[in-house]
Amino acid sequence: MRTPPTRRAVLGAAVTTAGTAVLASCSGDSDTGRSGTNSGSPNAGGANHGTAPRGKSGGEYVSPDGEEVAAAEARRTSGPVRKIGLTATPSRLDLGGGLVVGSWAYESRLPGPEMRLTVGDVVALNLANHLPAATTLHWHGLNVRNDMDGVPDLTQRPIKPGAEFAYRFKVPHPGTYWFHPHTGVQQDRGLYAPLIVEDPKEPLKYDKEWVVVLDDWVDGVGGSTPDEVLDELSGGRGGMDHGGSSHDGSGRDGSGRDGSGRDGSGRDGSDHDEMDDKGDPGDNGHGGSPRDPRTPKSAKRRSGPSRIMRDSYSKLLESHGGNVDYPYYLINGRVPKAPTSFTAKPGDRIRLRIINAGGDTAFRVALGGHRMTITHTDGYPVRHTTTDALLLGMGERYDVVVTAGDGVFPLTALAEGKRASALALLRTGKGTAPTASVRPKELDGKLVEAFDLSPDESVALSVRKADRTLRFKLTGSMRAYDWAFDRKPYNPGQRHPVRAGERVRLEFYNVTSMWHPVHLHGHSFGLVGPAGPEHRASRRGQAAWARKDTVIVRPHSSMAVEFDADNPGLWMLHCHNIYHSDVGMMTVVGYRR
């Protein structure tokens, strides 16, 4: 096993010299002159930003429905067509223990119906939007063709209420994934479901499989909604409206501004408190919390209680645990007082596919009375490594194998820094179920993280010098709630250029007092380790660590990853804290023609 980097890698000169990635204007790429329907198709009117009509060349960047994307899809293995219907609808959801909430869900289920596919399948999924707002579907971790990636105003038009959209793509690789909207803060409702891609040549041997979906829950509890939580956190400014409609129905443009470029407080949005590597003046010393959130006159009155997490610290994350004080934490849609159970026999080898579908919470996971053998992370196999506990940031997945003991055992997901947990039970024999507050000793045992893992040889990136390096500062503060890359709020017209065939290195320099799980669409990357010239020299000529698509970047530290540019299009790069991304911590990596 490799020696992991120091969790708090001091940035020093590396941070002060880290430049912003080269940006390129794409005003010539916009296609706004075509008419079409409201079906959500990028070919029916074109996406609002950065796309070109199908079959039509032009523009500096590959468009999501361009010929390069179609050619890459044609090279993928093609199997049987899997026709699937899916409906997104307002739903009453039973979370157990008599708790029933109003929310949005797929097929009125929580989690939504599991989608199980095989490598090479052709997915033909029709999404019917019965919600009162526009939506999309994003296939988290699955490197689909670009025009099926589900990012509104970048790869497709938002699917309006009452409309449908036909997603169609080849399934490129096996693993544990999930799907959710990429519109506003909809993911923090009930709109998520596991997506499992099976490998016909799977070498892993096991007797049973348990899909475990972790979540933090606020929607419909005491009148709260994720949009009201966002409004409170941002001081009434709301989000970026990357979905075609105002979050709050006020007529504002979704960034909280009234069309004049000013937010409801009369400020021009450019005078936020700047964040440096010494912290934020509103911090509590542990990453901070919005002590005095701005409440401009235009901010809506909350229908629920305050949901700001004010006193939170995770030693493991070296950070404030999260922004949101959730009333419940769930495993497979159930609260700890009424946990879901998985039944097996003593001695069974059980494969757990663990998915963190939360909006603002990292989970530390352990199975009482058992050690876990890590076999995959973010869908890709690793050299098998034994651990007592796992840490999953939002969007991350781990596959583990356990040999079941005899009895009733707690699967506990501790909400890092939030003094609460989620619970499920493994039942293999007689025994008394543990209480909702159980804390297995394994939670404080050996914890293996992604940088402790080596990729299986079948998926290891080749040793190769990077052709291009893009550097990003993770910026923002709790008080201003102005999370961004390089202090630039998300603009779907922005591009960080790459070219097909390149080995691309991404370097993240977190100069905030908050941890961030960073996710890249359309690709998996190899973890390289801390960024900066001194680390670059020490890692030269070495292979990367595990393959992933989401990586935790701790406060005042750095991380470098590398990927092969083999999936053309326009791809989102963002923090997978749904509230951080929705106020602007997103950007676009674009393939040049």
Image: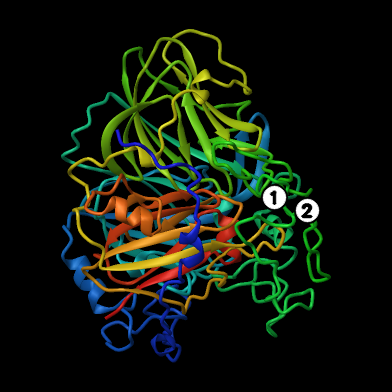
Q: Secondary structure at mark 1?
A: loop
Contact? badges 1 and 2 (CB < 8 Å): yes
Q: Residue at x 18, y 42 (%)?
A: 457
Residue 372, visible in the rendered structure? yes
The one of 533 and 550 positioned closer to us in this rendering? 533
Q: Say how many tags the image has.
A: 2
| Residue 76 image offset from top left, x and y in percent | 18, 61
Kindly indicate the quadrant of the structure image that contains residue 139. Answer: bottom left
**Left or right of 454 on screen, residue 177:** right
| Residue 308 image offset from top left, x and y in percent | 73, 49
Q: Amino acid at mark 1?
A: Gly
- What is the crowding at mark 2: few (fewer than 14 residues within 10 Å), some, or many (at least 20)? some
Kindly indicate the quadrant of the structure image that contains residue 204. Answer: top left
Kindly indicate the quadrant of the structure image that contains residue 301. Answer: bottom right
| Residue 31 image offset from top left, x and y in percent | 41, 87
**Left or right of 106 on screen, residue 382:** left
The one of 451 and 35 positioned closer to us in this rendering? 451
Q: Which residue is mark 1?
A: 288
Quadrant where the N terminus lies?
top left
Q: State the mark number for residue 291.
A: 2
Quadrant where the C terminus lies?
bottom left
Residue 182, visible in the rendered structure? no
Structural distance between the alpha carbons of marks 1 and 2: 8 Å
Q: Residue at x 50, y 36 (%)?
A: 332
| Residue 216 image offset from top left, x and y in percent | 59, 42
Q: Vertical placement of 256 versus 386: above or below?
A: below
Q: Amino acid at mark 2?
A: Arg
